[in-house]
Amino acid sequence: MLARFGRALADPTRCRILLALRDAPAYPAELADVLGVPRTRLSNHLACLRDCGLVVTVPDGRRTRYELADPRLGHALDDLRTAIVAVATDRTCTDAETQGCC
């Protein structure tokens, strides 16, 4: 599950989608407009998030609404964001040169 979560978070657009859905369920057209992403590209990202098990679809008449698969994911995103902010951003990893990270 952590690998799937990591895969989802590896793309900035998917992160933005998850954060938007954390606030409220949404329809793809609304998400595309709010995020400024072409609908076809958004559709691909939503498919990835569905495959990862992080979002679900909810039929609503002729439309399909997206929401987080579990409300705890919203809390996890908040916790992750605050943890990342707590990390000193002005330092680089001591192994950056040898490990190719940071």
Image (cartoon, rainbow, N blue to C red):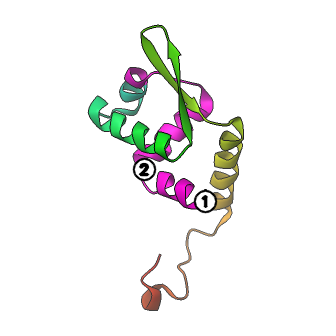
What residue lies at 50% left-to-right and 21% top-to-bottom?
65
| Quadrant in which the N terminus is drawn | bottom right
Give the percent coordinates (x, y) of residue 20: 53, 33
Q: 28 and 93: which one is in front? A: 28
What residue lies at 60% left-to-right and 59% top-to-bottom?
2
Q: CA distance from mark 1 to mark 2?
A: 17 Å
Give the percent coordinates (x, y) of residue 98: 44, 92
Q: 57 and 68: which one is in front? A: 57
Pick whichever of labels 1 and 2 is earlier in the sequence.
1
Magenta segment: 1-30
Label 2: how many Cα within 10 Å (few below 14, some 14–19, many 20+): few
Please identify the dominant SS of the magenta region: helix
Q: 91 and 98: which one is in front? A: 98
The residue carrying mark 2 is 12
Relative to residue 45, is residue 60 depicted above or below?
above
What residue lies at 43% left-to-right and 89% top-to-bottom?
97
> Mark 1 or mark 2, which is nearer to you?
1
Q: In screen coordinates, is 57 left or right of 63?
A: right
Q: Which kind of residue does numbered mark 1 sit on?
A: Leu
Q: In screen coordinates, is 70 left or right of 3?
A: right
Residue 69 is labelled as none
Q: Quadrant of residue 72?
A: top right
How many marks do you count on the picture?
A: 2
The residue carrying mark 1 is 2
Residue 23 colored in magenta in the image: yes
What residue lies at 53% left-to-right and 40% top-to-bottom?
18
Q: Which kind of residue does numbered mark 2 sit on?
A: Pro
**SS class of the residue under badge 2?**
helix
Q: 50 and 92: which one is in front? A: 50
Instruction: Say if mark 1 contacts mark 2, CB within 8 Å.
Output: no
Give the percent coordinates (x, y) of residue 93: 54, 81
Give the percent coordinates (x, y) of residue 61: 48, 7
